Amino acid sequence: MNGDQVGGIVRAVMSAIGGYFVGKGLIDASTMTTIAGAIATLSVAVWSVASKKPSPAA
């Protein structure tokens, strides 16, 4: 999996979760958009670092 795929998965999951919270009236749509964007960006950054980390020697 590459960073683009991870980002797509994170965005899809966040959209589903965000839709639930917005539908329940717990947060507004613009707040959810900001939160989802931040989480997606951080997730891809973590994935990028983790995927470049060398494997331990056997």
Image (spheres, grey):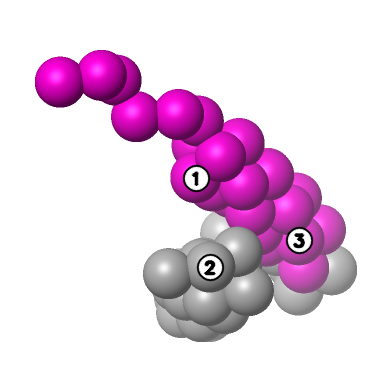
* In contact (CB < 8 Å): disc 2 and disc 3: no
| Viewer-proximal residue among 20 and 15 | 15
Q: Nearer the viewer, mark 2 or mark 3?
A: 2
**Kind of residue at badge 2:** Asn
**Kind of residue at badge 3:** Gly
Mark earlier in primary sequence (1, 2): 2
Q: Position of residue 19 (x, y in %)?
A: 54, 80
- Residue that label 3 marks: 37
Assess disc 1: are there few (<14), some (14-19) or many (≥20) residues with their C-alpha within 10 Å of its C-alpha: few
Residue at screen point 25% across, 19% down: 57
State how far apart marks 3 and 1 are (Cα): 21 Å
Q: What range of the chain is rendered magenta?
A: 33-58
Left or right: where 55 falls relative to 54: left
Mark earlier in primary sequence (3, 1): 3
Q: Quadrant of residue 37?
A: bottom right
Residue 10 seen by the camera: yes
**Kind of residue at badge 1:** Ser
State how far apart marks 2 and 3 are (Cα): 18 Å
| Viewer-proximal residue among 48 and 17 | 48
